Image (cartoon, rainbow, N blue to C red):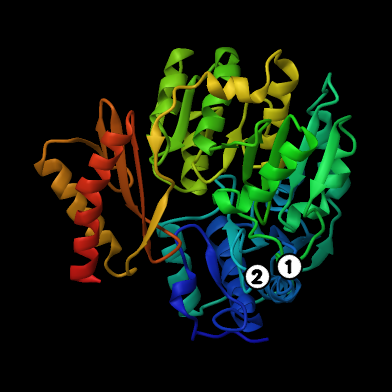
């Protein structure tokens, strides 16, 4: 392994580093990133220790070994966890009081991908300009040298016991769990088997080829088998996790997908009355239903930019106790640590079902329903996508629309909203529409989609 400067800059994304193993990601790239990371810890954070873990992808042990070598060769000591979910690493950050860490993962991406989520301190994973700074520092190649030590640490039992200790269910509820053959598979049996629930497992064997569906509960097609199994066994709830288990998707007892903004709306109804800080933060793609439910129980909705790193940091800054985003990242700091953990978030919904006298579907039906599109992903070049969004913002302002611009353009109307923003992880725009009626939904789509498509055809 050696340090290299010829690194494909496209792997440095908005929230993490992500590429294709064997194409623009290999041992030398991983070693170089390790040297860069270790040097930054020493020189800018006066730290000589960090934690490293890896997900269950085939390439992860290879990249992780190179990363650890790079970090120790910079003179930083590594506490090595082996194969873990991202939340297991975050838990290790807390109990070991070492908040610098890297997990080798590509989350829900296809099997050929891999990458790195990087944190320097208690703020969590770096994002935005910090990623740019890390890229530039890495490409410059001016790294420290040293002889750090790597030490193995087993976190599995402590993490399992911690999660199990948070719950005490009164009923033997029927629960279906779908790990999508992702890294959650290494831990779900250890946890759910101890909770006194009647659990049916699907795709809970770890398989880096993801033979059944991508481990991404934010995409409806990945929840079809979970929906079917919930109906088949008469379950009270279905729960699915993404590839590194920091996100959750839920299905009610009628086999209906509960979108993450509706998940947060339900959770807000139950937990906000007991919280000291009643502000709830969520990203710009979330439904008006969420804002309305938060206000009903005396809370304050805070619309913020998309990205789990951004949400987590703003929560920390403002002392918020609950938040999340449309992709399924959810953050609890009322009775938890504040990091995003798919298993914990799923069990919080099971807890509501356990406490209620009505079914989960009945709880869902208490929410106001809007007509909405899924999050649409429209291809637009990385070079031009920001410019295109800027043009949409100008259009909204020229029309006099009440427009939130914290992350793209979100024109708000009494009965509807639209969101047009650029993806921070792919060469795409993400677009969503919501309205009280189907007719109004079609009006919004008819107004904004032609504008977006015309701009893309003109500039991309």
Residue 268: tell me if it is visible: no
Kindly report the distance in space between the C-alpha atoms of the residues bearing marks 2 and 1.
Answer: 6 Å
Q: Which residue is mark 2?
A: 111
Q: Is residue 94 left or right of residue 456?
A: right
Q: Callout 1 environment at 10 Å: few (<14), some (14 to 19), or many (20+)?
A: many
Residue 257: name its quadrant: top right
Q: Quadrant of the C terminus?
A: bottom left
Q: Callout 2 environment at 10 Å: few (<14), some (14 to 19), or many (20+)?
A: many
Residue drawn at point x = 72 percent, y = 66 percent? 211
Contact between marks 2 and 1 (CB within 8 A): the answer is yes
Q: Residue 37: x percent and y percent? A: 58, 67
Q: Which label belongs to residue 208?
A: 1
Q: Residue 13: x percent and y percent? A: 46, 64
The correct choice, above or below, for 267 with respect to 54 in the image is above
Q: Quadrant of the N terminus?
A: bottom right
Most distant residue in the left direction = 398
The correct choice, above or below, for 344 with respect to 154 in the image is above
């Amino acid at each position: 392994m050696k340090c290299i400067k010829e690194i494909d800059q496209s792997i440095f994304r908005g929230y993490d580093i992500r590429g294709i193993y064997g194409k623009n990601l290999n041992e030398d790239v991983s070693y170089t990133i390790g040297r860069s990371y270790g040097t930054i810890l020493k020189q800018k954070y006066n730290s000589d220790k960090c934690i490293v873990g890896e997900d269950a992808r085939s390439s992860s042990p290879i990249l992780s070994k190179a990363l650890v070598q790079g970090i120790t060769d910079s003179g930083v000591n590594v506490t090595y966890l082996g194969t873990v979910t991202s939340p297991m690493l975050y838990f290790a950050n807390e109990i070991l009081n070492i908040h610098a860490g890297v997990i080798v993962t590509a989350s829900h991406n296809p099997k050929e991908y891999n990458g790195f989520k990087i944190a320097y301190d208690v703020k969590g994973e770096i994002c935005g300009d910090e990623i740019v700074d890390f890229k530039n520092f890495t490409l410059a190649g001016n790294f420290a040298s040293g002889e750090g030590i790597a030490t193995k640490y087993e976190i599995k039992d402590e993490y399992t016991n911690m999660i199990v200790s948070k719950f005490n269910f009164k009923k033997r509820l029927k629960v279906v769990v779908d790990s999508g053959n992702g890294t959650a598979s290494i831990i779900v049996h250890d946890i759910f088997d101890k909770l006194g629930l009647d659990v049916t497992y699907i795709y809970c064997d770890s398989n880096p080829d993801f033979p059944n569906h991508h481990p991404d509960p934010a995409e409806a097609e990945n929840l079809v088998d979970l929906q079917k199994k919930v109906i088949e066994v008469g379950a009270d709830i279905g729960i699915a996790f993404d590839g590194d288990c920091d996100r959750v998707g839920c299905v009610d007892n009628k086999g209906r997908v509960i979108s993450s903004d509706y998940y947060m709306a339900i959770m807000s109804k139950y937990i906000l009355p007991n919280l000291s800080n009643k502000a709830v933060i969520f990203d710009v793609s979330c439904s008006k239903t969420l804002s309305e439910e938060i206000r009903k129980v005396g809370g304050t909705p805070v619309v913020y930019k998309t990205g789990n790193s951004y949400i987590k940091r703003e929560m920390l800054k403002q002392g918020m106790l609950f938040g999340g985003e449309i992709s399924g990242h959810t953050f609890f700091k009322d009775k938890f640590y504040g990091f995003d953990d798919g298993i914990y978030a799923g069990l919080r919904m099971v807890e509501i079902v356990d406490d209620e006298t009505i079914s989960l579907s009945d709880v869902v039906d208490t929410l106001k329903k809007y007509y909405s599109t899924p999050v649409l992903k429209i291809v637009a070049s990385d070079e031009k996508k920001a410019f295109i969004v800027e043009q949409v913002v100008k259009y909204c302002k020229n029309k006099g629309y009440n427009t939130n611009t914290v992350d793209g353009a979100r024109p708000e109307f009494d009965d509807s909203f639209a969101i047009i923003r650029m993806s921070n992880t792919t060469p795409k725009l993400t677009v969503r529409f919501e309205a009280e009626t189907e007719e109004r939904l079609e009006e919004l789509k008819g107004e904004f989609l032609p504008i977006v498509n015309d701009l893309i055809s003109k500039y991309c």
